[in-house]
Image (cartoon, grey):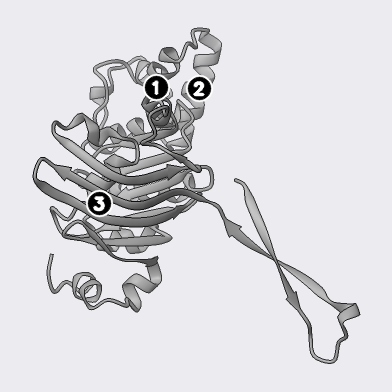
Amino acid sequence: MVNHTEQIDFIAPNTTSETLKVVPVEKKMSIYETKGLNLWYGANHALKNIHLTIAENEVTAIIGPSGCGKSTYLKTLNRMVELVPDVKTSGSIYYRNRDIFAKDYQVEALRTKVGMVFQKPNPFPKSIYDNIAYGPRIHGIKKRHILDEIVEKSLRGAAIWDEVKDRLHDNAYGLSGGQQQRLCIARCLAIEPDVILMDEPTSALDPISTLKVEELIQNLKKDYSIIIVTHNMQQAARISDKTAFFLNGEVIEFDDTTTIFSKPSDKRTEDYVSGRFG
């Protein structure tokens, strides 16, 4: 993680300028800057003038009622939304200071650095090993010992190695739903992304599997930036550092998660997180 510091001049009581102390303050770099983003599905104006700055090595939650634009926004961050017919956008999204909508920006390179985990587990109809090795092989890695290392590292990173190490050549469909979702996270880690996008990754899981995935997300933020869409406000409160509240295609409020849930500045946010609508 790249950290920058700001220097703050602090002069204690009864000191002179000769005893000036410099106190370093950690400041996280932004990984995404969204500026004036608008998106239309045909005539439907789905995202309206979105401005959002997302910091690296944090969990950022996106909450809001169904149809408010949460998943649409998430899918703009790796341009998967362009796979939907008749989509039009305006505005900019900067990923590490480069506009991902620029004509010379290669979408394949973006999707290598920005991985995606979907609502329902979607393992390939292959062995556990081949699910993880698929991405590295696509990127030209063929040597078995290197693939072995990647598979083990990725499965360990997704906290599922101990559960599957003796059945790597079994079909991934034989895993439970929660294991399949962690396998999909491991498959994402295998290509060494910078960002992991998660679209309601626990909505199809039982409470125990949900807890395991939430614990995994907390561990992964040490090495990755995670942006998660969730309909579960308690989940957002538990695992995220920042929360954005979307409503009718707009960002109503974006702040530290504790602030959003305890002292929101907008009454619509307060009404939503208190369960008055949605």
State whether residue 26 appears in this view: yes
Q: Which residue is mark 2?
A: 150
Q: Earlier in the sequence, mark 3 or mark 2?
A: 2
Which-is-in-front pick, marks 3 and 1? 1
Instruction: Determine the CA span between mark 2 and mark 1.
Output: 8 Å
Q: Name which residue type carries label 2.
A: Ile
Question: Observer-nearest residue: 104 or 183?
Answer: 104
Q: Is residue 271 above or below residue 207?
A: below
**Frontmost residue, 235 versus 1:** 1
Count neighbours of disc 3 (C-alpha within 10 A) and say few if under 14, some if 14 to 19, many if 20 or more: few
Q: Whole-percent x and y of residue 273?
A: 23, 70
From where the camera sits, is residue 202 visible?
no
187 w.r.t. 270: above or below: above
Residue at disc 1, secondary structure: helix
Residue 132, which numbered label?
A: 1
Q: CA distance from mark 3 to mark 1?
A: 25 Å
Could you tell me how far apart the alpha carbons at marks 3 and 2 are, in whole angstroms? 29 Å
Tag 3 residue: 207
Q: Quadrant of the C terminus?
A: bottom left
Q: Nearer the viewer, residue 85 or 264?
A: 85
> Which image quadrant: the N terminus?
top right
Image spot of residue 103 (x, y percent): 38, 29
Mark 3 belongs to which amino acid?
A: Pro
Write the residue at 32% across / 43% down.
198
